Amino acid sequence: MKDEELVNEMLKPVAKNEIRAGYPVLTEDHFFFQLVIDFMSDKRIWLGTASDLVSDMNCKAVSANTAAKLLHKHGKTMLKKKGVSVKFIRTNQKRLIELKK
């Protein structure tokens, strides 16, 4: 392999479907969505940050960062099927998540 081909191969972006070792797979089948549905079962509306959501749900298995990524990537479609809508609100100081039933 020529040097130029080797450099191009190294700089090639990682395919989106590739699973990186050691990282959780963030798909529509993630258990976090069922936790959110269970959490919203007795509420009509919830508003807060991703950290607040993870804290209020008593979920130690999912970080706030992972929760936010899952909600942004799959939340609107997955939760809407179950009757929960997701809205993202950005203020000067916080990024808020609004969950409505």
Image: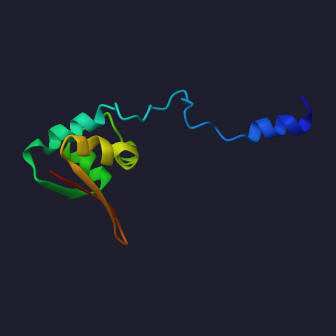
Q: Is residue 99 above or below residue 27?
A: below
Image quadrant holding the N terminus, namely: top right
93 or 74: nearer the viewer: 74
Q: Is residue 72 visible?
A: yes
Query: Whole-percent x and y of residue 24?
Result: 44, 31
Residue drawn 25% across the image and 43% down it = 79
Query: Whole-percent x and y of residue 26?
Result: 42, 36
The answer to which image quadrant residue 6 occupies is top right
Residue drawn 83% across the image and 39% down it = 7
Q: Is residue 58 visible?
A: no
Q: Is residue 79 above or below residue 23?
A: below
Query: Whole-percent x and y of residue 82?
Result: 20, 40
93 or 99: nearer the viewer: 99
The answer to which image quadrant residue 20 occupies is top right
Image color mode: rainbow
Residue drawn 44% across the image and 31% down it = 25
Q: Is residue 69 above or below residue 6?
A: below
Q: How many circles with numbers are drawn on the protein? A: 0
Query: Whole-percent x and y of residue 80?
Result: 24, 46
Q: Residue furthest bottom?
A: 92
Residue 2 left/right relative to 86: right
Residue 28 left/right relative to 18: left
Residue drawn 32% across the image and 44% down it = 77
Q: Residue furthest right?
A: 2
